[in-house]
Amino acid sequence: MSDWPDEAVDYVQAVADTKLVLGHRCAQWSLAGPSLEDDIGGSSAAQEEVGHVRQLFRKLEGQGRDGDWLRGERDPEEFSNAACLDAIDGEWPDFVATIAPADRAAWYMLDAVDRDDMDGMITKIGEDEYFHLEYHDARLETLAAEQPDGLQATLEETIPAALALIGPASYDDESDPLVDAGFTSVPVASIRERFADHYRDLFADTDVSLSGVDWSTPDADEWDETRRRIGSGGIGEEDLIQIRGERNAMFATE
Amino acid sequence: MTGDTKYEVFARKSEGDDTLHIGNVSAKSDRLAKMYAHNTFDEEDWNYLAVVRQEDLLEVQPQAMRHGVSADE
């Protein structure tokens, strides 16, 4: 049985699902980068995200979630990944501008968790995330210099999806249920501020303007608090088959 | 920031070890070069890893030194 509040299980599920789909996307795009170094970085990030997912799923199983369900025996509408990861249309720069905000949002959410039984795991994940986020930012800087218009257009779509994953701005010190329950120590409103400040600083001296980003989303009344997004949608059927590893079942070991 | 710059990569396994040249990467920025080096040469848990722009390496020419310094230099 769970000793976490229901909202906490959903919160960690959203971080885990975002990492699951992030790992899947990094693996899919790991031969599409502009250089071998980018491909190596993508492959490495994919492996690390899957490692994080295994640890987070173990925690969620400890809170009563079914292991098979966690590992993919569910419908796309039951995944709580950042909505921008449902599908990535475009070229490699669009991939970077999609995964970067989602990865940063998921890390800030995990970093806010205030549980002794999660401390060691979160510290280890944080060591990996330092390099993921630093790489994303380094790449966003080069793309901002080379393709500012395309990058800006993608960020206008992906940043609001990452903000929806973090949660509504109305969840502040007084009203965030997970702060109130003692599960997190940083309210959603503060995480959002930290996230927004980071990207405003990163692009301050570039030709990328973030003035077109809807920084107010999600509206708390429209927000799906379980899936941490606005509206429906989900990953594709082919993604689900690959995540489940259905075609590789014959190679599985117990 | 459009052209790639070559960087030499140096590392040591443990504190006190010699820092060795282990390879090179090409990158569009110093920040990216550091991440490329980290990802590309992660076969060891390095105690120290560094990149140096190839253009910043200063070659020491022992042959020239052996000639000594003339009185008017």
Image (cartoon, rainbow, N blue to C red):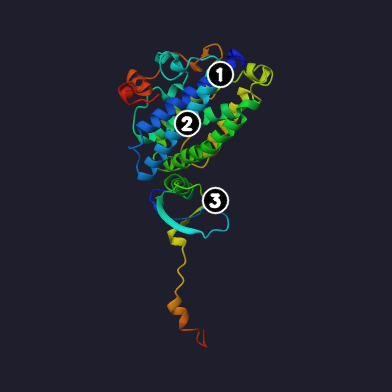
Q: Is residue A111 left or right of residue A148?
A: right
Q: Amino acid at mark 2?
A: Gly
Q: Amino acid at mark 1?
A: Gly
- Give the label, 1 or 3, closer to the camera: 1
Q: Quadrant of the C terminus of chain A?
A: top left
Against A141, residue A185 (above or below) is above
Q: Is residue A80 left or right of residue A183?
A: left
The quarter holding residue A73 reads top left
Against B52, residue A220 (above or below) is above
**Disc 2 to disc 3: CB gap under 8 Å:** no
Same chain assignment for discs 1 and 3: no
Q: Amino acid at mark 3?
A: Asn
- Tell me the distance, in whole angstroms, between the alpha carbons under discs 1 and 3: 36 Å
Q: Quadrant of the N terminus of chain A?
A: top right
Residue B7 seen anywhere in this rendered image of the structure = no
What residue do we see at 47% from left, 79% from top? B65
Secondary element under disc 1, as helix, strand or loop, is helix
| Residue A78 point in image, percent of width and height | 44, 14
Q: Residues within 10 Å of mark 3 (few under 14, many from 20)?
A: few
**Number of marks in picture:** 3
Subunit ID for the residue under disc 2: A
- Give the label, 2 or 1, closer to the camera: 1
The mark found on residue B47 in the picture is: 3
The mark found on residue A51 in the picture is: 2
Subunit ID for the residue under disc 1: A
| Residue A190 point in image, percent of width and height | 63, 27
| Residue lying at the far front of the rendered structure | A254
